[in-house]
Amino acid sequence: MRISKTERTVNYVVLTVMAVIVLFPIGTFVAAALSPDRSGKPVGVGSFRWDNFSTAWTQAGFSRAMTVSLIIAVSVVIGQVVLALLGGYAFGVLGVAGEKVLFPVVLLGMMISMEAIIVPLYYQFRTLGMTNSLPGIILINLGMGVPFGIFWMRAAFRALPRATFESAELDGAGPLQMLRYLATPMVRPAIYTLILLSFMWTWNDYFLSLVFLHGANQTATVALGVFQGKYVTQINLMAAGGLIVAAPVLILYVIFQRKFISGMLAGAIKE
Amino acid sequence: MSSLARSTSARTEAGAPASVPGAAPSAPAVRRRSLRRRRRWVGLAFAALPLGIYGLVVLVPLVQSIQYSFYQWDGVSTPSWVGVQNYVTFLTDPVLRSTFSHVLVLIGFFALLPIALGLLSAALLTRGQQHGMAIYRWIFFLPQVMTTVVIALVFKRIYAPDGPLNQALRAVGLGSLARTWLGDFTWALPALGLIGTWVTFGFCMVLFISGTSAIAPELYEAARVDGAGPVREFFAITLPGLRGQLAIALTLTITAALRTFDLVWITTHGGPGTSTLTPAVALYKAAFQNPQVGLAAAIGVVMAVLCLAVALVITRVSERD
């Protein structure tokens, strides 16, 4: 469509104003993180205080918290991909006995909010001695992730040509072999997106970690919450701590931006 | 192989001769069909592990939530049955009931404002492909990938007594308006709401822009031939074409407003007083701080029902002609 030069200029002005609105708060936060001043007053490049990051790292106990977050996120990502492959392949390729009931029940899970289950989940896990344990929270994350995982991989498997599976079946390949050697390599792009989204969701979680993990098992997000409560007057350290916690996902977002954006758009359309 | 599958396939074989001879399925077709049926049981076996974990972690607690919500329990002693008392408390207690009006305010900021901004930008940008859109999209999605804890800290600083917002107000001579935004009974809730606007408007923009690019250009051409101006064009073509995206954006943002927790917990803990208390914060306090477990479960059940209702109503309305 042809548009006039003025219109094009107006479009850029609108987009740029919106972009500045998004970037400005983040910019002042980064400036605060680098400031030698406790109140986070922005300073010139020459007086940047890079050791704010190392100070925040030690004072907030991030070595431990970041490790905990990483262990949880990586375990959840691996587990979720396996569960999503199994479930997605079953619903998308093999068909599942009783799927007319089971599939809607799975989809329902994408609309169930965490708040609806957190109370009994906590007290049941307490009875089983599984609160404040990493396997416990990994299991919860996995269960909560199953609906989206199945939904996502099922769609990917269904997009594959059926003839591929039929000819492999005639060649005598079993369902597990077909999943491992034929189907999984073909849906690799969908798996990568699932890995990124799942990592982001798990890493960024606050509520679940706040409820289930304490003390030495605190995740990075919860540790940051505690840290900012203790260092109310040291804005520069608080900001540095915030950037440390945001960094892993931000780095992935810089590298895999297209996968993130297309994944989040497609993921939103799930409902 | 289960006996159920075997018996159904036996029934098909027995039923076959009864049909018209000419239409009887050929032997390979029967074999293929029974193969497919057997495959469905293999499929169930494959899905068993994910379904089992999902059932254990989500479905069982969901049912238990409903059960808990009819009891009064402090988390330690023996629970006692109180019927619908917890629901009555949630709906009649003045503090708890105020969480609903807070949610309504938040919906204005989380849903209506970003969607209006998103539509406006989509309307402006439909009329031609922009270069460099990828960079803008990257920026607009930035708040989506940041953990809410960090976003809360970013804005805690913006709203601080000597933060950038108050400094800006003082610089332009509006120093009398400067205040401790998040500590103000009137302004804390709108201030929190604006954070939600900041988080979601970029997402809505990208969603609507990608939606308008899927609308057939011929529709716009035709409208222009008919002499429609930008406003008519927006209401006649862009808005109806975006119905699906609107439904998605409304559902996601309204449920996000209803479920707000992290943002409030990090910044205000529901205060000052109870002026920013949301249902999720009330649930957390009731469940884990001052245990009234039954009440917390009831809040959770009501929230889940509301989320589900919002999703269903919006989908239904958007699909109606």
Image (cartoon, coloured by chain):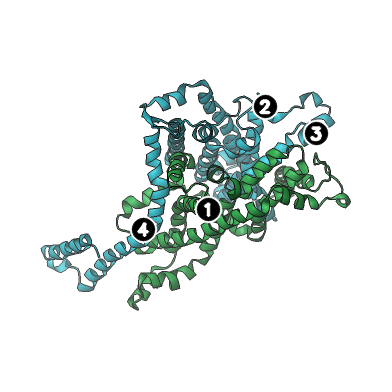
Chain colours: A green, B cyan
Residue A197 percent location from the top left of the image: 56, 55
Earlier sequence position, callout 2 versus callout 4: 4
Quickly name the residue at label 4: B48
Task: State the residue position of label 3.
Answer: B168
Amino acid at pointer 1: Leu
Q: Nearer the viewer, mark 3 or mark 1?
A: 1
Q: Position of residue B189 (x, y in %)?
A: 63, 29
**Chain letter of the residue carrying label 3:** B
Circle 2 Cα neighbour tier, 10 Å, few/some/many (<14 / 14–19 / ≥20) = some
Residue A193 relative to residue A37: left or right: left
Is residue B229 visible in this depiction of the protein? Answer: no
Taking A165 as reference, is A40 above or below it? above
Which-is-in-front pick, marks 2 and 1?
1
B229 lies left or right of B35 = right
Q: Which mark is residue B112?
A: none
Q: Nearer the viewer, mark 2 or mark 4?
A: 4
User: What residue is disc 2 on?
Assistant: B187
**Mark 4: few, some, or many residues within 10 Å (few <14, many ≥20)?**
some
- Disc 2 to disc 3: CB gap under 8 Å: no
Q: Chain of mark 1?
A: A
